Image: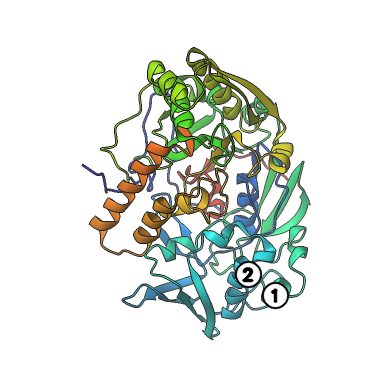
Amino acid sequence: MLKISRRHFLAGTAGALVLPGVVHAQIAAPAKGGVLRVSVDQAASVIHPLLTRVNPEYMVTELLYSNLTRLKPDMSIEPDLATSWSSDDSLTKWTFKLRDGVTFHDGSPCTADDVVATFKAILDPDNASPGAKNVGPIADVVAADPTTVEFTLSAPYSDFPVAVAYTTARIAPASILESDFQSLSTKAVGTGPFKLVSYEPDRKIVVERNPDYYDPERPYLDGVEINVYPDYTAEGSALISGDIDLMSTVQPTEFLRLRDSDGIDALRTPSGQFCNINFGCDTEPFDDPRVRRALALTIDRDAMVDFVTEGFGQPGNDTPINSAYRFFDGDLPMRQANIEEAKTLLADAGYADGFEATLIASDKPSYRTQLAVALREMAKPAGITINVQTMPHATYLDQVWKKGNFYVGFYNMQPTADGIFSLLYTSDAAWNETRWNNKDFDKLIVEARQTSDESKRADLYAQAQKLMNEDVPSIIPVFFDVMAAKRGWVENYEVHPRASVFRLDLVSLSDEAPTRK
């Protein structure tokens, strides 16, 4: 039966994954003051609120800016700049009421005009914002009055209030967006809980408490320092020594080390985060679905989970939806390794002797290379020779991402099924890496997006997952638990299943935290 129930992760302490040796964040009365030192594993090269691409960048802009809504750890939404929202019966007219009296960091008021300008900038193709395809089918947005924004959609969209919580839909000043859009790449003028102090993208980003934040109680911290550690081992050692307080992303091998270290809480939650092997579906030999299915049939998925995630994950079934999502087709049989069937498919496709291809993997996170190496070994018995090429992440983003024909991707969980499908797999997806461009799939996703009936939506998403599993535009063999680690003096931090949401405005430091200037 199709599983429709939404899994809730770490809503407070309820629903947390409890494992031996794993200590989870405890809810405590927040104390004010102190500077939190956070580590990230790659540079925050982009701090433009509408153009960010990777988790450290999302963290920085979340500190500096606000959305209309924001995601809680159970994947539901709560107010941010918007205090309430409603739609007409057609789900095409949405009205958001804004907080009154909110100001940007430069002292200028934040009004409905700024929200309108932000969404117009997101939708402007000249700006190439990743949010353009992920904030919903917006046809028009207007300011009805200084605290009321009205969105007109080109089609019904029941998930719209969730969509506006997207990581690149942070609200920025209309005066800057309309006159000097690119300037926000190096400076920050938001309404967020913190203000930018200094920005060294490859080394350290420093923010300080915004005294004029709309919630006078938050943030509890005086400031946050985001420190870049390209080396995972050095990053873990910095946490153990107390040089940093919070390690925002932890690899499985480091998790095992940190879990057994005194004074450290190892944090873990299941998620829809995954690695995938992307095919250029318009390029030989991957333009033939038989070739793609053959490769998918070489994978022992349980072994892949053990090898790539050290057991901190679950098998994937070549769709980006797993049980973490609301609309997950639990009836779709898990694909099993079958080398003989893989060989038959290759022969039918004209590759009876197999073929050779180069699979490219970024070095960040290291999961990518591990996955590539595992696939290389698993594909050998079918006659497929895979040469693994690893490259620095910055080079990968510049030369391979969205351009290559055979490479390893890595993606966070999205708030909804529509969000992940529309980000990666529809023909008009913001990051249409596979160039699958399947019109039947597109039709199913559009219809589900426009349907409010839960049972019908469930059926449509089930059909979409089945079609994707059969056609294999990308192989998705592994879903990851999201893992982090913190010193015991860091309070009220929860690992978010979305992986790109951090909510550091809720974090505080206990009296045991070291005093820093």
Q: Tell me which amino acid carries mark 2.
A: Asp
Between 30 and 239, the residue placed more toward the observer is 239
Disc 2: which residue: 212
In which quadrant will I find the N terminus?
top left
Q: Nearer the viewer, residue 453 or 278?
A: 278
Q: Residue at x 78, y 53 (%)?
A: 198
From this view, report whether residue 279 is shown above or below residue 126: above
Count the numbered circles shown. 2
Q: Secondary structure at mark 2?
A: loop
On the image, which quarter does residue 343 sit in? top left
Q: Residue at x 44, y 21 (%)?
A: 298
Q: Is residue 482 left or right of residue 48?
A: left
Q: Residues within 10 Å of mark 1 (few under 14, many from 20)?
A: few
Q: Disc 1 designates what residue?
A: 107
Q: Position of residue 430 (x, y in %)?
A: 57, 54
Where 92 falls versus 371 (above or below)?
below
Q: Position of residue 353 (x, y in %)?
A: 53, 16
Check if mark 1's residue and mark 2's residue have beta carbons within 8 Å: yes
Q: Secondary structure at mark 1?
A: loop
For the residues labelled 1 and 2, the Cα–Cα distance comes to: 9 Å
User: Quick one: label 2, few (<14), some, or many (20+) residues within 10 Å?
Assistant: some
Q: Position of residue 330 (x, y in %)?
A: 28, 38
Q: Is residue 261 visible?
A: no
Which residue, as the protein is rendered here, is positioned at the far left? 1
Place of residue 505 in the rendered image (x, y in percent of width and height, measured from the top left): 55, 55
486 is higher (above) or lower (below) than 219: above
Q: Nearer the viewer, mark 1 or mark 2?
A: 1
